[in-house]
Image (spheres, helix red, strand yellow):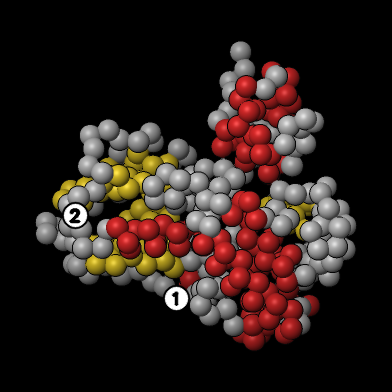
Amino acid sequence: MLDFPTIDKICAIYFHFGIKIEGICIIDIENLLFANYLVVATILAKASLTTYKVPMPELPEVETLRKQLAQNVIGEAVQDIAFFDERIKPFVISKDIAISAVERFGKYLVICLTSGEQIVIHLRMTGHLLLCEPTTEFPPYTRFAMFLTNKTLFCCDLRRFAILELTAFFSKTALIPNPLENFDAKAALAAASSRLLPVKQLLLEQGFIAGIGNIYACEILFAAQVNPFRKACSLTGREWQRIARASLEILSAGVESRGTSISDWRDLFGKKGEYQNHLAVYGRQQEPCPRCSAILERSKIGGRGTFFCPHCQK
């Protein structure tokens, strides 16, 4: 008997492979669970559930969590901590320690404590943070729970890749610049001057610019009208200015929309983001370009699906 995937996995497969299903459009994706057996079997035949890549939470998703946590847990005292996965090294927090701040560096979320220590979290592929009222019922795939004065913070992760640790000092050096604050086009031009790799691949390097992932790199380069296959060293100062401006605009819009939910991403309260409704090129191969009406294409750069317009991205 066919083992039906979840709606989220079907969505991820649809966007990653661009599978076209006659008679069913993306807004009806939830109906796939009840669609004809052969339709779902076709999806599974075209996309191995063990090999497709689920989009990782990027800067807008992690910034969404940071903002929501800052609004809801600062000042809360940590009453207890529980670990449910041997991959996470257990740690102890002294009593009467409270949360003093919540920060983000690239894709890392940092919960600052009044003791001066920091809890560093990287969600990786399928990690979630969920803030709930005090409860004795834990969400599925809970790996970590932090019991606060009036709330409980869960870290849930189906694939168990999320990273969580307690540290006295989190090094920020390798994670700058921040494209929401200081994407310097002149500095980018200089740093890329000897780089022969495709510009899209360079944007994904966290030591070059922190927080940009595959979805937003595609969207940024489309907005900047730069071909993702261009060698990074070939870009002009003006093109880097367009990339810097597009990064700020698109990432800010992503934060405003609480991220992009085409797969597992949910915000701190379990709600989907909305930026998937505003994607210009990602997952839209074989559709008309929204700028020039040429047909959008999908290819691979560095093993990652890359969506672009071959006509207006130069």
- Of circles 2 and 1, which is in front? 2
- Disc nearer the start of the sequence (2/1): 2
Quarter of the figure with the C terminus: bottom right
Q: Residue furthest top?
A: 1
User: Horizontal and vertical percent for residue 103?
Assistant: 37, 67
Residue toward you, 238 or 204: 238
Q: Quarter of the image containing the N terminus?
A: top right
Kindly indicate the quadrant of the structure image that contains residue 53.
top right
Q: Quadrant of residue 157?
A: top left
Q: Position of residue 206 (x, y in %)?
A: 55, 67
Please name the residue shown 62% across and 17% down the image: 2
Q: With 115 as the anchor, is 272 left or right in this view?
A: right
Residue 5 visible in the shown view: yes
Report how far apart the C-alphas of labels 2 and 1 lie in the structure.
Answer: 28 Å
Question: For mark 1, what is the residue?
Answer: 173
Q: What element carries label 2?
A: strand
Asked whether residue 167 is in view, the answer is: no
Q: Which amino acid does label 1 sit on?
A: Thr
Could you tell me which residue is drawn at 51 percent across and 62 percent down?
Answer: 255
Query: Is 237 located above or below residue 307 in the figure?
Result: below
In this rendered view, identify the residue nearer to me: 275 or 282.
Answer: 275
Q: Mark 2 points at which residue?
A: 78
Where, by quadrant of the figure, is residue 21 drawn? top right
Camera-nearest residue between 272 and 141: 272
Q: Which of 158 and 27 is in front in this view?
A: 27
Residue shown at the point (39%, 61%) measured from the top left: 66
Kind of residue at badge 2: Val
Q: How crowded is mark 2: few (under 14 residues within 10 Å), some or many (20 or more)?
A: many
The residue depicted at 58 percent of the width and 72 percent of the height is: 248
**Mark 1 nearby-residue class (10 Å; few <14, some 14–19, many ≥20):** few
- Left or right side of 256 for 20: right
